[in-house]
Amino acid sequence: MSSLLPWLFSAIMLGFACAVVLNRNPVASALSLVVSFLALAGLYVSLNAFFIGVIQVLVYAGAIMVLFLFIIMLLDLKAEERRTLNTTATLGGLLVAAIFVCELFSVLRHFHKGSLPFPPLAAGPLDDVRGVGTMLFSNYNLPFQVIGALILVATVGVVVLSKRELK
Amino acid sequence: MNLNDYLAVSGLLFAIGFAGVMLRRNIIIIFMCLELMLNAANLSLVAFSRFHVSAAGLPDYNGQMLVFFIITVAAAEVAVGLAVIVSLYRARRTTHVEDITSMKF
């Protein structure tokens, strides 16, 4: 992959993430989030994580965001009117985010191993799905089954929460 | 791009998500910004997985397993969270966090 494409995907991802925060219309925010997730899938592919990139598109940009859009349409949310911003929360949030970014960059400047290029992978096609699948069903077999139970519990919980006569 | 660039991008994405959680008052937008923060963590995990190449010339799949599990748990979390938001909307007719103050000290 060309060395310019990851930067392009990063710029798209960060720009549309800002659009998620700044848009007043929830539907526009959700669609910006879809674009941001698709660009993130491109970044995963640029890191040779093809399987993760595919499930990012299928699960996040597909299933999860459709669920978000469905709920936004169901609740019929209008673009929110301009409310007076809570200045303490706004200033505090921006300040903590800025401090986090400054700290991150100062740490990264002293992490010299990270500024070397990535070590080369083995030549030939990368058996990505085989590697992930082998590890999933051998080393991570127990967490995989626990995740299955978790999804079952979440499904039952959603059904219980959606019952109308909940008191 | 090297590892530091990916980590910087991931940190910026996390900071944007955090600022969104603090700035926005609509509970669904706050939920979307939480998803942004989860994805920032995923990006740094995949970057470290590519950085730590094994002797056979394969990326370290342990990091990608963790990303796989995070995505699965996030899917379950979104389903339950949106169900909670819908029942909250049914009870209170609002999705603004400032209108929901019964647990405020």
Image (tube, rainbow, N blue to C red):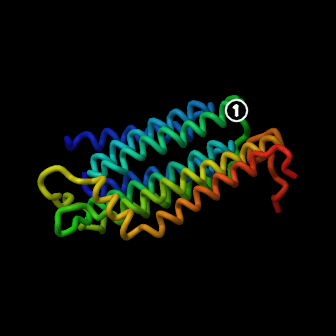
Q: Which one is nearer the viewer's eye here, B8 or A119?
A: A119
Q: Residue furthest left?
A: A123
Q: Which one is nearer the viewer's eye here, B93 or A3?
A: B93
Picture coordinates of residue B40, whole percent (x, y): 45, 53
Residue carrying label 1: A74
How many numbered marks appear?
Answer: 1
Mark 1 residue type: Leu
Q: Which one is nearer the viewer's eye here, B90 or B94?
A: B90
> Residue sitting at 54 percent across and 59 percent down?
A148
> Residue sitting at 26 percent across and 66 percent down?
B52
Which chain letter goes with mark 1? A
Picture coordinates of residue A43, whole percent (x, y): 33, 46
The answer to whether residue A121 is above or below residue B23 is: below
Please rate how many residues cluster around mark 1, counting C-alpha atoms within 10 Å: few if below 14, some from 14 to 19, many from 20: few
The answer to whether residue A166 is above or below residue B62 is: above
Rendered image quadrant of residue A102:
bottom left
